[in-house]
Amino acid sequence: MTVCSHKKMMVAIGFVIIIFCFWNLLYPYAVVGQERLFVWDKEFWQEYGPCQYVRDFFAQLFHFAWLGSLLLALACSGVQWLTWWLLSRFRNKKCESYLFVASFIPALCVWYFMFVKFDVNSEELSYDFLQRRGQWEQIIEKSQKDKPQSLACLHVVRMAMHQTGQISDEEMFSDLALTNDAMTSTTSAYMMSDIYMYAGLVNLSQRASFEAMASVEDFSMSGRALQRLTETALVTGQYRVAEKYISILEKTIYYRDFARRMRQMIENPSSIDSHPVYGSLKKAYANTNDVLFN
Amino acid sequence: MKWTLVKLLMLMGLFMMTACSFAPHDVEEVSSLPDIYPDYIGVTVPVEIAPLNFNMTDDDVSRMDVEIRGSKGGYLHTNGIYADFDIDGWHELLKTNQGGKLTVSVCAEKDGKWKRYCNFEIFVSPYPLGEWGLSYRRIAPGYQMYGHMGIYQRNLSDFEETAILDNKDMEGGCVNCHTVNRGKTDDYVMHVRSEHGGTIVGHQGKTDLLPSVNDSIGGAMVYPYWHPQGRFIAFSTNKTSQLFHSGQNKRIEVYDGQSDVFVYDTETKAVLRDTLIMKKYWAENCPAFSPDGKWLYFTTARRQNYPQNYDKEKYSLCRVSFDESSGKIGNQVDTLMNASDTGKSITWPRPSYDGRYMMYTQLDYGYFSVWHPEADLWLLDLKTGETRPLDEVNSDSSESLHNWSGNSHWFFFTSRRDDGLYTQVYFASIDEQGKATKPFLLPQQNPKRYYHRSLYSFNTPDFISSSVKSVRFISQ
């Protein structure tokens, strides 16, 4: 009896490990793509209501692929254990093994539906994931195997080639004006925001982040977009707007430290000039010839 | 019994100790005005307005103690982390002091030390607002993709906001331009941009859903204005495009590759077109009827080559006579403000309902004033023909949309002065000499928390004389 119970326990733990590895090793981009911003304040509750408040509380943990994967694995495990608990009420010793196997069916269904939901737009999610981590070689390798369809992904490939010295500045920055065609989804807007920031086009990076923020599923908020909006407001000298974003990010888990650093910069604007990234972007912004993008 | 008494006494003692510690003590007198948010110092308010709750701008202030005394009597006191006035007490005080003034005394505690600032005044206008509230769209910045937005109504006597139409209820479509007829909510126009959207026209209890693209004009019905009698609506139809600046201090250009003005007849459902307001090489826009219904105002600019000459597009203010029996316009266009004389562009003309003034927004070029920091409100006296900038209310940021209260003593306008990006609504009154009072920001229960936290702009606001039943949009 004990051996049997231990077996079940081992199988269940194995199930958790498999799901965890599946998400964390094979689809980490799909996991982090589910991150939502959760703000610890009354306004957040009032705006989104109790269901989304609870959901976004957990969704904020998808900031890290491993933590999101663990949550997904535990959720599936929870479904399996609940099913098993319900089935074990039958007390039919003969079918116990079959019932135990059957207890995995709802969990497998949940797993499958999660995969279907999360892996939508996998091309953009995967390129974005690699781009955020600066994995330029992998981006180029991936694009050589299968040419990306998304215009934003093609821009990311070009950025990777520029980062690795394979193309010139001119090649990198040509065609960036086709903003509308490139931004067709939240993820593509994130990528374009990063590309424009890389190109020193702060206004356009800000615009892309607004698009990303507006298009987040279920009208949720995005910490990543708000983070970029803070940076662009800081570089363009919109300090009062930056403060608004900072005060929101200060009430979050993962963006609090960033927000505090940004607040220190607003309180001491000369520190922006001496910042390696923001300082050079600020100079570039001041010297940029005005070009109109569609 | 004995223990109950002891507990009661302890509770009373605790209450008194707490009350004492919250009350100002060892107060230092300061010879400056308090730095409050919003800036309500010296503003003029209508008797019906919701309490002007305010905060200290200094986040380190832990407590405020505020007293208000009316020049004609009455007293109000609040003590808390921000000045949060009792709504009934506030209204009673304003009623007593209509045409008078309120003197506000502010004490603030920071780091355990209390300071009393110089008193300031709030003036209670002799003119009532005469409106129930305000309708507006709340929308987050977005240019191509859009997220959560809705059309809401706000009771201006308290802080209650309810949704007229929220796009959460219609799978994320774009809702826009809820426009009523001089505040009367029975006549309204609203656009819903989604797969099955269109223009909703509500008139005399009936609702019509017009298609998004009107075949007879070959475009969408965009900026509406009701004829005072309610039968006709003037619309513009605009082929709008956006361009984004990479350079400093400019963000976006919104321009029309083409635009015209036409009149829609709600009775016959006919579109009344006239070449005088649909000229081929001119972009007519922003129509508005005069309060007597005999004139149709609009703006017009010579169309340019876009995007090269986007900053050459300058709109003049014109008018043409209108026959309300037939819905036909006259055969001569008068130019009231000529862009070639001023070198500037005019947008959003809004005549006061008493026929005395025309308020409009003036900017360097184009018509989409919300993205133009130089955009200011101007006031044209229709009796004398004199015009002037409304310096009493203008700021360094964009002043944009505006309209009058039914009695023409009050107007609202939108401005980005608060943080430079998110548009808020302000109110001011105008006296018999045409001088405007210092504007005040739309009151909120806890204004600093509300405005500093909100990621939405107020868009296309308008006064409403009564509340609107929420609209349930069923796509067809």
Image (tube, rainbow, N blue to C red):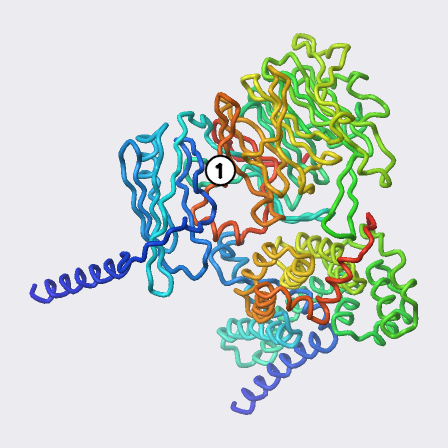
Image location of residue B393, percent across then percent down? 55, 35
Residue B417 vertical position relative to residue B217 in the rendered view, above or below: below
Residue A140 vertical position relative to residue B55 in the rendered view, above or below: below
- Which residue is the extreme one toward the left? B2
Name the residue: 65% across, 81% down: A17
Name the residue: 73% across, 40% down: B195
- Asked whether the viewer can see residue A59, the reply is no
- Asked whether the viewer can see residue A42, the reply is yes
- Which residue is the extreme one toward the top? B325
Name the residue: 62% across, 45% down: B139
Image location of residue B308, percent across then percent down? 86, 40
Image location of residue A49, percent across then percent down? 51, 54
Quadrant of the rendered image containing residue B389: top right
Q: Chain of mark 1?
A: B
Residue A104 vertical position relative to residue B11 in the rendered view, above or below: below
Given residues B389 and A158, the one toward you in this image is: B389
Q: Is residue A154 left or right of residue A34?
A: right
- Looking at the rendered structure, the kind of residue marked 1 is Arg
Q: Which residue is mark 1?
A: B154
Q: Is residue B12 left or right of residue B312?
A: left
Q: Residues within 10 Å of mark 1 (few under 14, many from 20)?
A: many
- Number of marks present in the image shown: 1
Given residues B457 and A265, the one toward you in this image is: A265
Image location of residue A152, percent across then percent down? 82, 60
Mark 1 residue element: strand
Residue B219 vertical position relative to residue A125 in the rendered view, above or below: above
- Which residue is the extreme one toward the front? B31
Q: Is residue B302 left or right of residue B376?
A: right
